[in-house]
Image (cartoon, grey):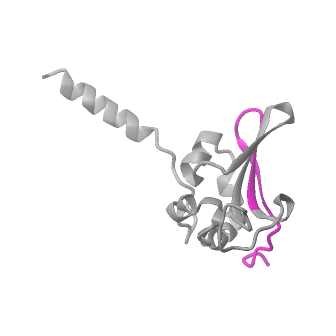
């Protein structure tokens, strides 16, 4: 009985110390982003402008941390020199019913590139003009 209490306390401390700290972006609803798979519910189109304007806050996270923050990407590509690219779809994806669909190159999507050391190094939103940028 005496051994169980310290072990459970240590394991609880370990579990909470390993959680990813979310970037502080005013107005960003990370849970809404994660739940809006392929952008079908229209939540991501409202949130992507906040990510785009605050892109520097999302850099230097590793792949697992980005997954903790934004959820699993809908697509990913292995690129040259051990680089990985995550894609999160925002609008016009064929997975969505009741929404206009477009070819892959014309869809609105968030791209996050990771270098060979597994750090996010660039963030770009394809086919999107951000209303928050001047």
The reply to whether residue 19 is visible in this rendering is: yes
| Residue 100, picture quadrant | bottom right
Residue at the (76%, 74%) spot, across then down: 130
- Split into 4 quadrants, where in the image is the N terminus? top left
Residue 131 counted in the magenta span: yes
Span of residues in magenta: 109-134
The C terminus sits in image quarter: bottom right
Name the residue rendered at 68%, 45% in the picture: 60
In the depicted view, which residue is nearer to us: 39 or 129?
39
Q: Nearer the viewer, residue 79 or 122?
A: 79
Residue 14 vs residue 72: left or right? left
Above or below, 21 against 128 in this view is above
Taking the image as shown, residue 40 lies to the left or right of residue 122, namely left
At horizontal 86% and vertical 60% (from top left) the residue drawn is 105
The picture places residue 55, in percent across and down from the top left corner, at: 70, 59
Percent coordinates x, y for residue 44 in the rendering = 63, 67
Q: Residue at x 72, y 77 (%)?
A: 132
In the image shown, does 32 or 92 lie closer to the viewer?
92
Give residue 103's quadrant in the image: bottom right
Q: Nearer the viewer, residue 96 or 113?
A: 96
Count of residue discs? 0
Please tell me in which quadrant of the rendered image residue 65 appears.
Answer: top right
Residue 62 among magenta residues? no
Above-or-below relation of 66 to 42? above
Q: In the displayed image of the protein, which residue is found farthest to the left?
A: 1
Which residue is most to the front? 97
Q: Position of residue 37 (x, y in %)?
A: 60, 59
Residue 62 visible here = no
């Amino acid at each position: 009985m005496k051994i169980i209490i310290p072990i459970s306390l240590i394991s609880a401390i370990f579990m909470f110390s390993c959680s990813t700290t979310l970037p502080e972006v005013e107005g960003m609803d990370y849970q809404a982003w994660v739940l809006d798979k392929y952008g079908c519910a229209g939540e991501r189109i409202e949130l992507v402008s906040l990510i785009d304007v605050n892109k520097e806050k999302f850099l230097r996270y590793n792949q697992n941390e980005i997954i903790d923050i934004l959820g699993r990407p809908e697509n990913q590509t292995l690129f040259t020199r051990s680089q990985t690219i995550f894609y999160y779809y925002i609008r016009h994806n064929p997975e969505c019913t009741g929404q206009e669909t477009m070819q892959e190159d014309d869809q609105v999507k968030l791209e996050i590139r990771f270098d060979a050391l597994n750090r996010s190094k660039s963030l770009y939103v394809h086919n999107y003009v951000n209303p928050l940028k001047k």
